[in-house]
């Protein structure tokens, strides 16, 4: 729980603007990231990827466990702004291996025919320490046997849902 709080705090600090959602023509990877096609070969579950993201976002993929090269158990898509300065959306994925409690104090939403749950941040609508507006929240659902968890404090709830619903 403490690790989740720290992770969410870091996400709050990193997010910046609410970008428009547009169809991405090409994925722009940063930091010599592993690619989507490589991830698909190294996990034992369906990988779902947003089809509609802003063209100027870049992507870095983090894999877990950290030292594993061939058998990845879960991963995170980190969509960054064009300057690679702010984390805009974090999308974690893993195999649905047990019943995760997803609906505590959450709004139920539809994600591609799947039951999803959205919880806005407790300080949503307020300014953070840098004077930036906190928005977004935590969105969770299971799609095609894959547990998906999206977090943002820079992208609005509606934009998060739009990105989530574009995931295939």
Image (cartoon, rainbow, N blue to C red):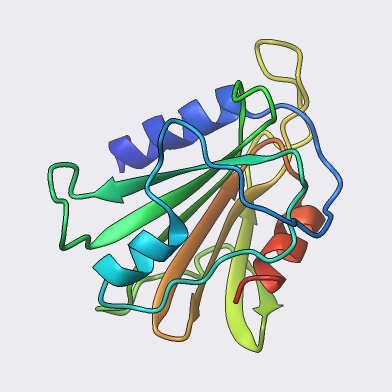
- Position of residue 147 measured from the top left corner of the image (x, y, whole percent): 41, 71
Q: Residue at x 71, y 56 (%)?
A: 160
> What quarter of the picture does the N terminus occupy?
top left
Would residue 132 appear left or right of 58 to someone viewing this image?
right
Residue 44 lies, with reference to residue 91, above or below; the image says: below
Q: Residue at x 13, y 50 (%)?
A: 68
- Position of residue 137 measured from the top left corner of the image (x, y, whole percent): 63, 48
Front in this rendered view, residue 14 or 66: 66
Residue 57 lies, with reference to residue 72, above or below; the image says: above
Front in this rendered view, residue 74 or 121: 74
Front in this rendered view, residue 149 or 6: 149
Front in this rendered view, residue 163 or 11: 163
Q: Residue at x 30, y 49 (%)?
A: 63
- Position of residue 55 measured from the top left corner of the image (x, y, whole percent): 77, 46
- Position of residue 158 measured from the top left corner of the image (x, y, whole percent): 81, 58
Residue 113 lies, with reference to residue 126, above or below; the image says: below
Would residue 106 appear left or right of 21 to someone viewing this image?
left
Q: Residue at x 30, y 70 (%)?
A: 41
- How many numbered circles does the render carry? 0
> What quarter of the picture does the C terminus occupy?
bottom right
């Amino acid at each position: 729980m403490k690790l989740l709080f720290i992770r969410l705090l870091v996400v709050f600090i990193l997010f910046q603007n609410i970008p428009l959602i547009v169809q991405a023509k090409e994925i722009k990877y940063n930091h010599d990231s592993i690619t989507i096609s490589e991830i698909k070969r190294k996990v034992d579950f369906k990988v779902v990827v947003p089809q509609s993201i802003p063209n100027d976002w870049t992507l870095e993929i983090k894999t877990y466990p950290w030292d594993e090269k061939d058998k990845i158990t879960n991963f995170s898509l980190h969509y960054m702004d064009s300057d690679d300065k702010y984390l805009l959306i974090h999308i974690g994925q893993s195999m649905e291996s047990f019943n995760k409690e997803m609906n505590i104090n959450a709004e139920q939403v539809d994600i591609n025919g799947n039951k999803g749950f959205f919880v806005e941040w407790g300080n949503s609508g307020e300014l953070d320490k840098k004077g930036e507006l906190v928005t977004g929240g935590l969105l969770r659902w299971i799609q095609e046997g894959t547990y998906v968890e999206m977090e943002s404090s820079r992208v609005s709830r509606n934009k998060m849902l739009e990105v989530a619903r574009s995931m295939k």
